[in-house]
Amino acid sequence: MKIVEQIKAPVAHEMELFEKKFQLAMASRIALLNRITHFIVNRKGKQMRPMFVFLVAKMIGDGEVNDRTYRGASVIELIHTATLVHDDVVDDSLKRRGFFSVNALWKNKIAVLVGDYLLSKGLLLSIDNGDFDLLQIISVAVREMSEGELLQIEKARRLDITEDVYYDIIRKKTATLIAACCSLGACAVAPGSPDVEKMREFGEMIGIAFQIKDDLFDYGNERIGKPTGIDIKEQKMTLPLIHTLQVASKKDRKWLINSVKKHNRDKKRVKEVIDFVKNNGGLEYAVKAMYDYRDRAMTILNSYPDSEYKRSLELMVEYVIDRKK
């Protein structure tokens, strides 16, 4: 059994029901919108986010979920999908998970409007049902994701990212949505309980580990294959490079910054930067940080009694660290 199927097993029934509810939550009277949302639903990914919502809810709710849990999962997926549609427009990306993106098939104007529609559907789903506590969790996540993207753009221009700023960016850009899924799962079944904040922190730890893992893919290894250097080409300052800049001599630091700023399209120079980072402990440093966040997530989980849902969440943490792409 694939690891993702193993993780999903204790909530397979809920996930099946969720898919039906999610499609209903997207419905519109406008035929064009329904065509596009049908296209989006049929090209969904692993659906890790709703899985987090259901696993956390069942772990905290003694195996039970309620209507709020389904609404919370639907809202997070609607808003996540909206951000993906908007991201493809911002990045001018024509592919998403191997298929054409919405903007590639229907152009930017329609893609932006579809993203806006999905966002409003998500917010209204919470408002119409009086789920204001869930709405607050989601609204904070959307604000932080926007701030994280803008902070990264601002800092990329000057390449002056410190480790603190890097963690601030990835916490907001990546970790905040996973944190929202976990706190939503807790809040749906145990509103106002300490579990809501505990699970938010758990999700944040996983999200940070997830992003560091993504950073490492850019440098490749035996299992992943050739390094891509895409982050360097896009002038993204990731943890292996930030650490290497911190420990490098003044001369090497100048060469590294010059390479990323002015020679980031030169394949040979990018490979030299990758090799320099590898040879100066950048990867080991990032791997150690990733495992540290993994351990912090596991410590939070260990405070809960054993259950199949807890086991799945443990598997999810390991999957984030061990995934191949």
Image: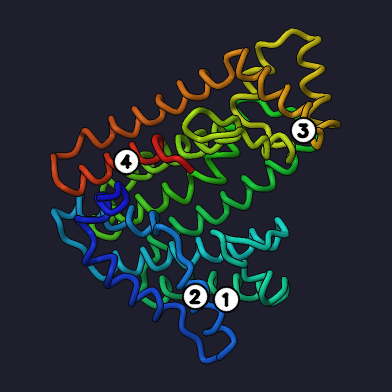
Q: Nearer the viewer, mark 4 or mark 3?
A: 3
From the viewer's perspective, is 62 left or right of 298?
Answer: left
The residue under label 4 is 198
User: Disc number at residue 117?
Assistant: 1
Q: Helix, strand or loop at disc 1?
A: helix
Q: Amino acid at mark 3?
A: Lys
From the viewer's perspective, is 43 left or right of 86?
Answer: left
Q: Nearer the viewer, residue 83 or 198?
A: 83
Q: Helix, strand or loop at disc 3?
A: helix
The residue under label 2 is 121
Q: Helix, strand or loop at disc 4?
A: helix
Look at the picture and state if 281 lies above or below 73: above
How far apart, in angstroms, are the residues tagged by discs 1 and 3? 41 Å
Q: Quadrant of residue 228?
A: top right
Q: Amino acid at mark 2?
A: Lys
Q: Amino acid at mark 1?
A: Tyr
Residue at x-position 48% and y-position 36%: 208
Residue at x-position 35% and y-position 50%: 182
Residue 221 point in image, percent of width and height: 52, 28
| Crowd tier of the residue under label 2, counting other residues whose Cα lies within 10 Å: few below 14, some 14–19, many 20 or above | many
Residue 103 point in image, percent of width and height: 67, 70
Disc on the earlier residue, 4 or 3 = 4
How far apart, in angstroms, are the residues tagged by discs 2 and 1? 6 Å
The residue under label 3 is 267
